[in-house]
Amino acid sequence: MASWNSIRLEVTYEVFGWIAFVSWSISFYPQVILNYRRKSVVGLNFDFLVLNMTKHSSYLVYNAAMFFSPTIQRQYHDKYGFKEMIPVAANDVAFSVHAVALTAFTLFQVLIYERGNQKVSNTCIAITTAVLVSALVCVIIASPKHSWLWLISVFNTMQVIMTAIKYIPQAVMNFRRKSTVGWSIGNILLDLLGGVLNFAQMAVQSIDQDTWVNFYGNIGKTLLSLEVVFFDFLFIFQHYILYPAEKEERNQTAVQERVDSLIKSPNKSVSTNV
């Protein structure tokens, strides 16, 4: 079994991992709190939530199986070498459990708060159904030969694909509305920090082991970090550059002033006639 060569790097690895866990975990709360304060989920894309739930569920299956199953760990070592370290840490499992729970709670908020005319699209339903059916088929294929490493790798691939897809509906919705109102930027900033630290954690392990197997042995985690960073920068650009809150407030103020002038105008005419 592989072990750490440097205590300093091992400590750094653990620190990065748990800070990423805290950052990613806290990132769910700004949206939950925003929904609670507004008593509304208008502006939060429902496709994003459903796809996010599918993504995190797949990632939970991969992380938990890789971390807890001796059989899968043995298959991993048979494929990549006995000296290689398991690429899933305790913070990965903890994050996945928390992510599934908080996403489920946010979906519950959708049911009890104002949502306007928003609904889950047929495209989202079709994608989610295809993922679930594919997962079931893969379980049936893997069972006879006990190809459990291959099976959880499929779930890992699913979460990578869902990560790429899940952000698109919200980004498009922001673009069409020319606004990010209802979409918490706090979520994005914390998500970005988690993604960067997650990638740094893998780099630290690779430096200590003097091998980059960690990156392609858990390609899902690698791609996840890169996707998160890319889309978070996109949302930051939308929020602060394209559709800043100050600009929206000025537009709303101008509209309100025009409305007020229309309301006051008839009153002036009446007083004059009197």
Image (cartoon, rainbow, N blue to C red):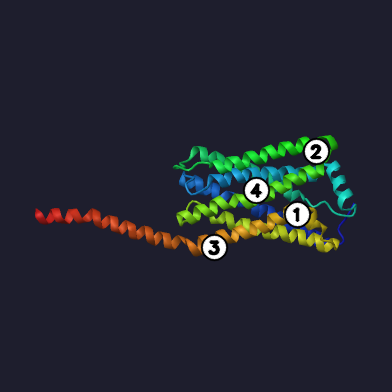
Q: Secondary structure at mark 1?
A: helix
Identify the mark nearer the N-term, 1 or 3: 1
Q: Nearer the viewer, residue 38 or 176?
A: 176
Q: Secondary structure at mark 4?
A: helix
Residue underneath mark 1: 219
Q: Is residue 106 above or below residue 250?
A: above
Identify the mark nearer the N-term, 2 or 1: 2
Point out residue 42 in the picture as x, y percentages from the top left corner.
47, 46
- Looking at the image, which residue is at 48% across and 40% down? 113
Residue underneath mark 3: 237
Q: Nearer the viewer, mark 2 or mark 1?
A: 2
Residue underneath mark 4: 162
Q: Quadrant of residue 9?
A: bottom right
Tell whether label 1 touches label 4 (CB within 8 Å).
no
Q: Secondary structure at mark 3?
A: helix
Q: Cα distance, mark 2 to mark 1? A: 20 Å
The residue type indicated by label 1 comes to Ile
The residue type indicated by label 3 comes to Phe
Q: Residues within 10 Å of mark 4 (few under 14, many from 20)?
A: many
Q: Cα distance, mark 3 to mark 4? A: 22 Å
Residue 142, numbered label: 2
The residue type indicated by label 4 comes to Met
Identify the mark nearer the N-term, 3 or 4: 4
Q: Nearer the viewer, mark 1 or mark 3?
A: 1
* Lateral position of residue 53 relative to residue 83, left or right: left
